[in-house]
Image (spheres, helix red, strand yellow):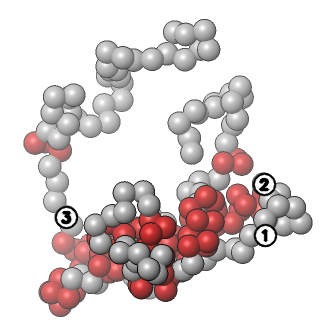
Amino acid sequence: MTDSGWEFFYKGWKNPDKPYRRGATTANMFPKEMDGCLDANVLKSLGLNKTRMAQCDAAFFLQLVLPFCHPDESGIENDPRLPFFVEEERFTNMSKYESGKGGSYGHTWTATTAKELVNFHGVVIRDGVLGSTAGAIHRRWKKDGICYNYGIANTMTLTRFGELKRNLKLCHNGSVPKRGMPNYDPAYK
């Protein structure tokens, strides 16, 4: 325990009360007993079929994991997926407005949408598919540069990309206990 009240585990940490990954050790992170398989019935209900597999539609596979719309609105009965982009939209806009910035004071904030956030993440994915710019994604917008990509540059401006990147939120930080309050969790974000 340090003077600040934090405890560090440099030689590993064990918690027999909550074994989150059965059989996992520092030497074997992926034990055989944790092998799984995909649920064919669920994938079929979400629209996966031979035609979709043959098309290799990247957007379809992305929305299997991170649905573009709220699963309650997908039209799929008992859709088991958790919302992602609509929640990211809600928390990002909520955080910006609750901070008091983006209104009368500070830079203006144009509310984002789930569609715009799909495009934002698509830009990041496409940058990786093109070979990544090693943290210099701004090169994708430079028309006379060798890394320029019309698809990325046409999706959104570099200014808007940077604005979204700085303000993205996946949770509501305003509703959680702050440092020094009961139930404060330093890992929450």
Three-letter residue code for mark 1: Thr
Percent of width and height locating residue 43: 25, 75
Residue lying farthest to the left in this orientation? 32
Which residue shows up at 20% across the image and 33% down it?
Answer: 24
The quarter holding residue 184 reads top right
How far from the left and from the top, in percent, is residue 163? 63, 66
Kindly state the secondary structure of the residue where label 1 is placed: loop
| Residue type pointed to by label 3 | Leu
Which residue is drawn at the image coordinates 34% and 80% (left, top)?
59
What whole-number distance in Å separates the C-alpha atoms at marks 2 and 1? 12 Å
> Which residue in the rendered view is the most extreme toward the right?
104
Give the distance between the C-alpha atoms of the residues marked 3 and 1, in whole angstroms. 45 Å
Tell me which amino acid carries mark 2. Answer: Ser
In this view, the mark in front (2 or 3): 2
Which residue is depicted at the point 19% across and 64% down? 38
Q: Height in image: 7 above or below 62?
A: above
Tag shown at residue 108: 1
Say which of marks 3 and 1 sits in front: 1
Q: Residue furthest bottom?
A: 51
Q: Residues within 10 Å of mark 3 (few under 14, many from 20)?
A: few
